[in-house]
Amino acid sequence: MSPKDGTYESRLEKLLQKAPLSNATLVLADQDLSKSGGSFAGLSVNAVAAASTRLSIPLCSYSRQSTASDYEWRRRWEEAYITLKFQPGRLAELARRALIIARGFATIRAALEKAPADKTPSRLLATILGRPDSADKLAQYGMGDQSRLTIVPKEGNWDNRRASLFLGYWLWNSILRYPGLLANEVAAASHLNLGIKVFKGPQVQALFQKAVYRGPFADRQDPRWWRTALDEILGAADVADGLELVRARVDKRAKRSSCSVEPADSAGYYCPILEHPVSLKSSRGSLPWFPRGADLTRVCSTCLDSYGPWLGV
């Protein structure tokens, strides 16, 4: 292919429409493509993202940098592709997660085939997730991200490929990533007022099994829990928090959550920078860096001085 054949985006688009790539369900690209040779010298992941978006093919990028975990939280939640962590020697793990993502997008697209075309993006995603009562909370995650408007149906019909692309990015980069509607392991333990080791115990896990998220991109090795479902379990047991429930049914010596800044305080929230539990007193929330619906996500006070400019503080 000659360099005169057009921009990187147009050339990539042509390649992805030819066999054997024409049936691609996911594109996986290195974050550092600047060393690409031949007619693609100087290629960037943004060019790949542009071509993938035009063809409505999901894109995952990965970073080989040693600071990949630090880069994780710095990514903007509005990014139109998914970034995965990659550690040398763990290629199988990268492939495993890429497969989960490809299947997740396929699940969303299949659900769209049956979805009515008169729903807002938040109500549409709530229906796909089997949680129609969560539409209002989902809408909060979409505030400020105008890219979701691109999935509005034309003449009563969804562009299912394009809609699944943007709904999938929204779900992965925002809703699953920032605790609020859903909570990761640390955030769920913090919300329940349980020490993380206590929450990981098999008997305790069984207590909250009904709250486990099983929708698109669900990962047994990196699970999520529905926050409202956790609260419903506590309400049904007539207890104040998870600690009271666990002490009554599993271990009366179970330890409460502990704030990573002030260990004497219970936590309740989650800091995405340190990936630690934090208390309301020792953290700050409602930052422009995070989607509005992520009300369990707060930055601990020790991180604010270092990362304030990044966070818009």
Image (spheres, rainbow, N blue to C red):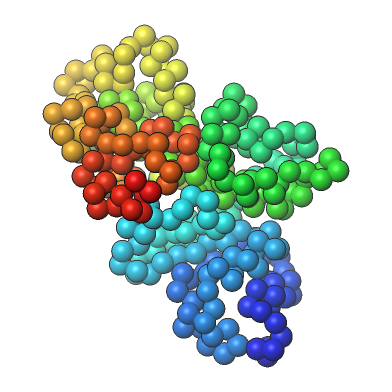
In the rendered view, does 164 fall on the left or right side of 292? right
Query: Can you say whether 249 is above or below 225 in the image?
Result: above
Q: Position of residue 60 (x, y in %)?
A: 53, 61
Residue 203 can be seen in this image: no
Query: In terms of image quadrants, where is residue 300?
Result: top left
In the rendered view, does 26 fall on the left or right side of 282? right
| Nearest to the observer: residue 71 or residue 212 | 71
Q: Where is residue 220 in the image (x, y as percent from the top left)?
A: 43, 43
Q: Which residue is drawn at 45% across and 74% down?
A: 32
Query: In terms of image quadrants, where is residue 54?
Result: bottom right
| Nearest to the observer: residue 282 or residue 65 | 282
Q: In which quarter of the image is the N terminus?
A: bottom right
Query: Can you say whether 126 is above or below 79 in the image?
Result: above
Query: In terms of image quadrants, where is residue 123?
Result: top right
Q: Residue at x 15, y 33 (%)?
A: 263
Query: Can you say whether 238 is above or below 299 in the image?
Result: above
Q: Position of residue 68 (x, y in %)?
A: 35, 62
